[in-house]
């Protein structure tokens, strides 16, 4: 099999030209905060988008302004945008059709051209053919073509633009050919938590460059490992780095490479620094893995640094358990990549986790579990209507994904869905794997 890297599309442009609005429309989400105040989008936002038959990673960036580097926050926003440009496969530059062409647009176009990436030019906030005829000609002064007149708010012109964009997307970059039944494992986490050291420990050789300088691993590095008849693909990633220590509330971190690795892996080993303890960034990293539907092992690395401090050990493990409650099924393992402590436990855990993550179940067994759950705890009545859960079927693995057909899916309370998930985990032996549950309305004949 071949593990492919998904193309990355970065939305860039001056502040308040509509990047976040377009991001929300294409990703069918409201993750990006939309506000008329310049600088609202302070972190990059990422979403996997499938358009027609093309898949790509969409990145929303803060506004880029070539002449403003004095303000700390503005400088950090621009640094994040430049990083997105550097790591993107394709750049979409957005301008404001109603404000018209500005000197700043000229400077940004010059900057983007030097990036040497495929580049598309959008003139946003054009809602009708009449507005296009009136407002678009001024932008031809840039000397670029084609110019796409669109409305991120209302969808005008987007279908034609997306057809052209996806037709020109680079093919996914393929890594080396990997034998079938290989378990792909990505090591992700903040810089300097010991990802490369752990990879070397698992490989039993100095295969990856190790340094205590954050950011040493610039690209994801793959290594094939065969152990006791099972093959593994180890993916060592660049650290998810933090920017702007002077403004802790505006932590900046690069996650694009880690997200690419998550696209390619089955299991994510999320490393946490035992000396520093779990941080907000660590929980965000785990959240990204969960959004991608990846199985997780949470590794508290550098355990050797606190091996004599049992009070500190308990505090760290309690903190990890408390802050990762949203993935309470993910095993937490203290390890030391330096000394090898706890590392021998990882491969048996990976095997067990992968088995659960890729397991398939007969429909009859699933429906017996569902029937027993409903009998033990029937769903609540919703708006005077009794909720009926008719049957369940499995539609995917990695992670196990189940569809339950009901008479009123929207009436099933999230707490009852959580009850069902926990019941399936227990009865099906999926205590360590993520599980997805989808409720659908049964079509009447």
Image: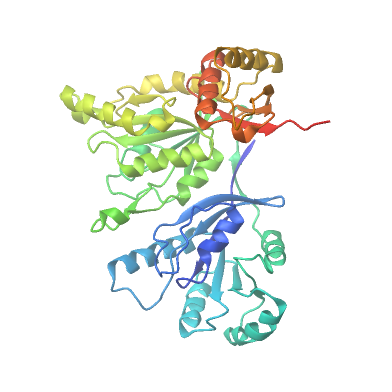
Examine the rendering and report whether any part of residue 9 can be seen: no
Query: Does 210 sit left or right of 419 as displayed?
Result: left
Asked where in the image residue 385 lies, by quadrant, the reply is top right
Residue 274 rendering spot, x and y as whole percentages: 26, 33
Relative height, residue 331 to residue 223 (above, below): above
Q: Which residue lies furthest to the front in this view?
A: 384
Image point (69%, 29%), residue name: 407
The reply, left or right, for residue 59 in relation to residue 283 is right
Q: What's the image's color scheme?
A: rainbow
- 295 vs 392, left or right, is left
Residue 215 is situated, as x and y percent measured from the top left of the image, at 34, 50
Look at the image and tell me in which quarter the N terminus lies: top right
> Can you tell which quarter of the image residue 156 is in?
bottom right
Nearest the camera: 396 or 441? 441
Residue at horizontal 38 percent and vertical 30 percent from the top: 325
Q: Quadrant of residue 284?
A: top left
Image coordinates for residue 378, horizontal then vertical, percent: 58, 18
In the image, residue 426 lies at what x, y percent? 51, 15
Q: Is residue 42 visible?
A: yes
Residue 65 position (above or below residue 440): below
Between residue 443 and residue 202, name the one nearer to us: 443
**Residue visible at 26% across and 53% down?**
248
Nearer to us in this view, 207 or 19: 19
Image quadrant holding the C terminus, namely top right
Q: Furthest residue to the right? A: 445
- Count of labels in the image: 0
Q: Which residue is drawn at 54% across and 69% down?
A: 116
Between 288 and 390, the one nearer to me in the picture? 390
């Amino acid at each position: 099999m071949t593990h492919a890297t998904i193309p990355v599309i970065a939305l860039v442009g001056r502040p308040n030209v509509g990047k976040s609005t377009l991001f929300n429309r294409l990703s069918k989400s409201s993750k990006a905060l939309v506000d008329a105040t310049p600088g609202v989008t302070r972190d990059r936002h990422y979403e996997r988008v499938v358009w027609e038959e093309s898949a790509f990673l969409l990145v929303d960036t803060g506004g880029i302004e070539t002449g403003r580097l004095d303000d700390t926050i503005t400088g950090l926003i621009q640094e994040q945008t430049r990083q997105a440009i550097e790591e993107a496969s394709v750049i979409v530059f957005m301008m404001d059709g109603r404000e018209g062409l500005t000197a700043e647009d000229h400077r940004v176009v010059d900057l983007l051209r030097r990036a040497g990436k495929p580049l598309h030019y959008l003139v946003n906030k054009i809602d009708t053919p009449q507005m296009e005829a009136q407002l678009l000609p001024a932008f031809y002064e840039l000397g670029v073509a084609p110019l796409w007149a669109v409305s991120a708010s209302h969808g005008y012109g987007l279908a034609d633009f997306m057809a052209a964009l996806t037709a020109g997307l680079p093919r996914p970059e393929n890594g080396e050919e990997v034998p079938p039944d290989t378990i792909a494992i990505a090591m992700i986490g903040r810089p300097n938590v010991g990802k490369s050291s752990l990879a070397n420990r698992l490989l039993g050789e100095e295969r990856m460059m190790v340094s205590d300088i954050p950011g040493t691993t610039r690209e994801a590095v793959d290594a094939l490992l065969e152990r006791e008849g099972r093959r593994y693909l180890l993916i060592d990633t660049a650290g998810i780095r933090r920017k702007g220590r002077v403004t802790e509330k505006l932590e900046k971190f690069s996650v694009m490479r880690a997200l690419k690795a998550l696209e390619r892996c089955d299991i994510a080993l999320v490393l946490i620094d035992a000396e520093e303890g779990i941080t907000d960034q660590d929980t965000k990293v785990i959240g990204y893995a969960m959004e991608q539907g990846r199985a997780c092992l949470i590794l508290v690395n550098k355990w050797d640094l606190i091996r004599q401090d049992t009070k500190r050990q308990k505090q760290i493990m309690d903190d990890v358990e408390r802050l990762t409650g949203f993935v309470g099924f993910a095993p937490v393992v203290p390890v030391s990549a330096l000394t090898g402590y706890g590392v021998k436990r990882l491969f048996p855990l990976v095997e067990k986790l992968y088995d659960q993550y890729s397991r398939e179940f007969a429909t009859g067994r699933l429906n017996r579990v569902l029937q027993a759950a409903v009998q033990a705890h029937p769903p609540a009545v919703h708006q005077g209507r009794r909720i009926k859960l008719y049957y369940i079927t499995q539609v995917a693995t990695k992670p196990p994904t189940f569809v339950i057909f009901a008479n009123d899916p929207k009436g099933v309370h999230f707490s009852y869905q959580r009850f069902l998930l926990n019941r399936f985990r227990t009865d099906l032996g999926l205590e360590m794997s993520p599980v997805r549950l989808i409720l659908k309305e049964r079509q009447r004949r």
